[in-house]
Amino acid sequence: MSAPSPTTLYIVGDRFEPFATHDTTRTVSRLVGDLRADRHQDEAELLLVEGQGITSFDWDRIRDELARRGLTDRVEIRERDAGCLCRQTETHKHRECNVLIAGLSQVGENHFRAALRIHNDQEMLLDHQGGHVQGMVILEAARQMFVAVSERYYLSHWREQHYSFVLDSMDSQFQTFLFPLAASIEYEVRTADLSDPAQLRFDVQVTIEQAGLPAATVRMVCGAILSSAMAQKERRGAARALRVLGRREPGLAEAH
């Protein structure tokens, strides 16, 4: 007679509490609370699978509680091996919790892949989080993928230069909800114009996949421009905006 299958629970960060209402999902805090209430004492075997929003600190907290309850030998923890986070120089994010790209690799001549990694304190989750990952997180992941791939695989040819990035257009399609579980990012460079090192142009497509299905597709036309040239364009643009608004300000004051 075969042994019964273990009870499987998907564990997500506390920020994803609206998602963790299913029988097979738990937030970190709810799982710890269940363990302290002895709700899993009768489980012959328990499998805990990592979702989004989990850190090694969270797993240590869970392991400590399992040990206190004498459940360590009955519980298997399946941490997600998403790979190394992209560095600050590749994502241009200054806080580790805001980096969405992990395990970046090149899998074809113009094809790249990474794991989506969402920290519990990611900046776009702080004010509102529903039962699925909101679209703005997906768009930010697509933007970070563009920056990271460009920095690691294209701009490395001109290491002595410093580049800034611009988006000309971003066209997104959302095929299905993305949930705070394991997901991958497929990145295709459709065209890359590298003829002018001062201004590189890219046409790329990013696909977020989960459970074997595309959740969202983002098409971007974007560029990498020498930071010195970008600074000059920004100064000219800011000066023009200030001049125009300065001329209009008296009229606006009279209207009010």
Image: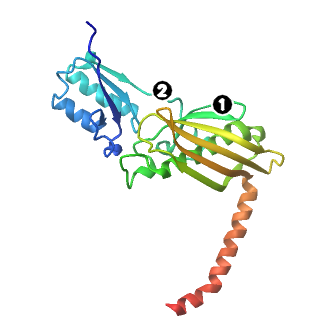
Say which residue appears at 41% left-offset and 50% top-offset: 125
For residue 210, the mark is none
Q: Horizontal and vertical percent for residue 115?
A: 53, 34
| In the image, farthest residue toward the right | 195
Within 10 Å of the Cα at label 2, are there few (<14), some (14-19), or many (20+) other Cα atoms? few
Say which residue appears at 16% left-offset and 28% top-offset: 38
From mark 1 to mark 2, how far is it between C-alphas?
A: 17 Å
Left or right, residue 17 beside residue 179: left
Q: Is residue 5 above or below residue 223?
A: above
Q: Horizontal and vertical percent for residue 123?
A: 45, 50
Q: Amino acid at mark 2?
A: Asp
**Residue 92 appears in the picture as rendered:** no
Within 10 Å of the Cα at label 1, are there few (<14), some (14-19), or many (20+) other Cα atoms? few
Q: Which residue is mark 1?
A: 106
**Residue 156 appears in the picture as rendered:** yes
Q: Is residue 4 above or below residue 32?
A: above
Please tell me whether mark 2 sits on a helix, a strand or a loop. Answer: loop
Left or right, residue 107 beside residue 134: right
| In the image, farthest residue toward the top | 1
Q: Which mark sits nearer the N-terminus, 1 or 2?
A: 2
Say which residue appears at 70% left-offset and 75% top-offset: 240
Q: Amino acid at mark 1?
A: Gln
Say which residue appears at 74% left-offset and 56% top-offset: 228
Tag count: 2
Left or right, residue 223 beside residue 127: right
Q: Horizontal and vertical percent for residue 25?
A: 31, 35
Q: Which image quadrant: the N terminus? A: top left
For residue 81, the mark is 2
Please tell me whether mark 1 sits on a helix, a strand or a loop. Answer: strand
Circles 1 and 2: CB atoms closer than 8 Å: no
Identify which residue, 46 or 211, lies in the foreground: 211
